[in-house]
Amino acid sequence: MRYINVAVPVPIRQVFTYVFECESSREQTPLIGKRLVVPFGHREVVGVCVEENVTPDHAALTNNDSAKTTNDAKTTEVRKVIELLDHIPCFSSELLTIAYWLSDYYQHPLGDVIATMMPASLRKPAKLDDVQEDCLILVDSDEENDVLLSPKQKSLYSLISSNNNLMTVRDIKQHYSSRIIKALIDKDIARRISVSKPRINWQSFLQQASTNQSKHVATIEQSIAIAAIEQANSFSAFLLEGITGSGKTEVYLQVLEKVLSDHKQVLILVPEIGLTPQTVERFAQRFGDIVVSMHSGLTNQQRLAVWHQARRGDKGIFIGTRSSVFLPFHNLGMVIVDEEHDESYKQQDGLRYHARDLAIYRAKSLNIPIVMGSATPSLETLFNARTGKYHYLTMTKRTGGAVLPSQHLLNLNGLSLQSGIATGLLEKVQQQLELGNQVLFFVNRRGYAPALQCHQCGHVVECDGCGAPMTMHMSTNNLQCHRCGYANRIPNKCSECGSQELISHGIGTEKLEQFLDYYFSPYKSVRIDSDSVRSKQAFAMMLEDIHANKYQLLVGTQILSKGHHFPNVTLAIILNIDSLLFSGDYRAAERIGQLVTQLSGRAGRANKKGEVWLQTHQPGHPLLQDLLNNGYTHYSRSLLEERKAANLPPFSYLSLLRTETQVAEIGIEFLQYARSMLTQFSNATVIGPLPSLIEKKQRRYRYQLLIKCHSRKYLHAMFAQVLHELEKHKGANKIRWHLDMFPTDIS
């Protein structure tokens, strides 16, 4: 009998003590890192043992929901573990260290952190034992057995024979059904056995990579970057700032060869699921079958399979989105964060971690190098590079002789527009189409139109739960709120005055696509936004068709700016840049620079000259003037100076405490209580309570406190005290509230 502490997947900032009774010698092994089924309240949950051989603390147990208290409330019975699920730890010591760090760094309950790190399949009470592999072995290789076999069975028999009479059932099932496998077993020609899982033979893949024709000769700038990264034999953080089209991916490909030759794995983080297929294809062309992807488009079983491949060392290169940073690698040797500036790396609910920052911590703890690449680095990363914390590498020239596109501002004041496009630009589009080129249109609004209004009384249809105008979606004939997702049919008449004169306002991707199909009727358009891209396969097919020039007009939202290579795009038009100029978020200027630069990078990537046009009613705006005249390098340095003058991150640390309540006064009262405690700390500045930039969402009013401090360590120590007191507040369990330690979005 042993007392153990278990991290349970609940939003409570403590671990819980249970008693574990050993029933076999196998269960007498260490328990730390293993999953267990434990009782919690009136239910059973899957937790992870984080400490064993502990001494029960009576005071702690009396406040523990997992304990049963007798009628006299003087003694407490520790509840028993129901079942041990793992024979080997699901969480290694490295992963548990990461879990503790995440819990401290983001001030988040440990049990919830561990649950976030696990694939969904492991959060269920299913046993996990992947030490051995289920295999099929031939027990009778007499060729006379051929007469007993059907053609399919003969084919499987031959396949196993060619693999030294032994194959994994997992590999066999990729080509043969369970019925065929069972037939060989029933005829005593084969039997199932469990064998130790083999490690992958890296050398064969490295030989393939060294002779692969897709390998390019590095440019001078690429060679300098490759040499610098390859010299790192321990933890080093590199910022690779390369303009769009400068060949950052080729640098990644070449530095990986040395890592793989040392029999080590590589993690490559990409910001969006849409980038995964093309990135995987590029790396698979060079390294073959050791490349695997991980993203939200996979099923739970597929994600678990990738988890196993990382743990066993079956694969060498793992390309994935944000959650891939939690994979249990067998021997990780390098981390690459592509497009490190992208906000998709920040989780916006639950455990609000930043995958880039966690990747840096993990690389440091493993003493391995990490490379962060971007044409538009985040100001935090740029600051660390300029102050010497990171190694700073730059690439200023496009590969293959391509040049950066020319950038222009188009003053819309007084001009006639058709579906939001200036008439003069339509003529330029026609010219490019006649030359056989493609044109890209960016509009930061999906749907048909951002608002539906009554022409008689002026009433605008709004979401009842958010108070925001409902967006028209003609493809589904509904109105949708883009804050909460609520949708309803497009009405036939005004709900206020009964008039049937309803008109749309503004331009969305649907409306623009419809106009382009009509205006440039001989040519085909494609719309790329979160409505049209429902799956990884659909997006991959769209990209293939674009590369095959089946579409000449590309319409989309920010998805189009995410590092795609469109060699035939020679003209990019940004329709509504003004909507981004007047945001209340202090990061808005940084986002504008990144968006415009990334979108510009889609044009003129091959041997064709490219042009970018920004339509604006604010042609003299200093941000636009600086960006287009001086480029992102100068622009970002100017923003850093502004941040320094305003004492904003990265020159200080900012946290956000937010409430979401159906009655605004309740949330304000809670935040005022929080403010009274926070203002006791002299080294912190507290701003608020204030309404969030998006004040209402899903019938809940959102109010917040902003807390600014010069010391991250001081900020952590402060919240470690304050959060425990906030949880004791009478309203803490009756309202929604959360702390985002280092927010990237304060809207």
Image (cartoon, rainbow, N blue to C red):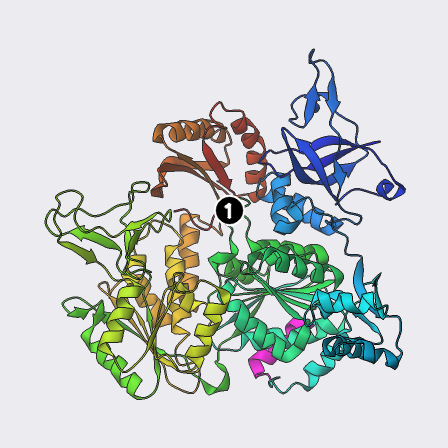
In the figure, is residue 744 to the left or right of 84? left
Residue 374: give x, y in percent of width and height.
51, 67
Q: Residue at 73% of width from left, 30% of height from top?
A: 17
Residue 628 counted in the magenta span = no
484 and 588: which is toward the camera: 484
Residue sticking out furthest to the top: 72
Query: Which span of residues is magenta-colored?
Result: 218-230
Q: Nearer the viewer, residue 228 or 520?
A: 520
Report the residue marked by disc 1.
Answer: 742
Q: Please give left or right for residue 284 compared with residue 190 in the image.
A: left
Quadrant in the rendering for residue 5: top right
**Vertical placement of residue 494 versus 620, above or below:** above
Residue 271, above or below 745 = below
Please report the residue visible at 30 percent of the width from the left and 81 percent of the height from the top. Answer: 523
* x and y, in percent, of residue 152 in the image: 72, 76
Q: Relative to the observer, which residue lies in front, 220 or 537?
A: 537
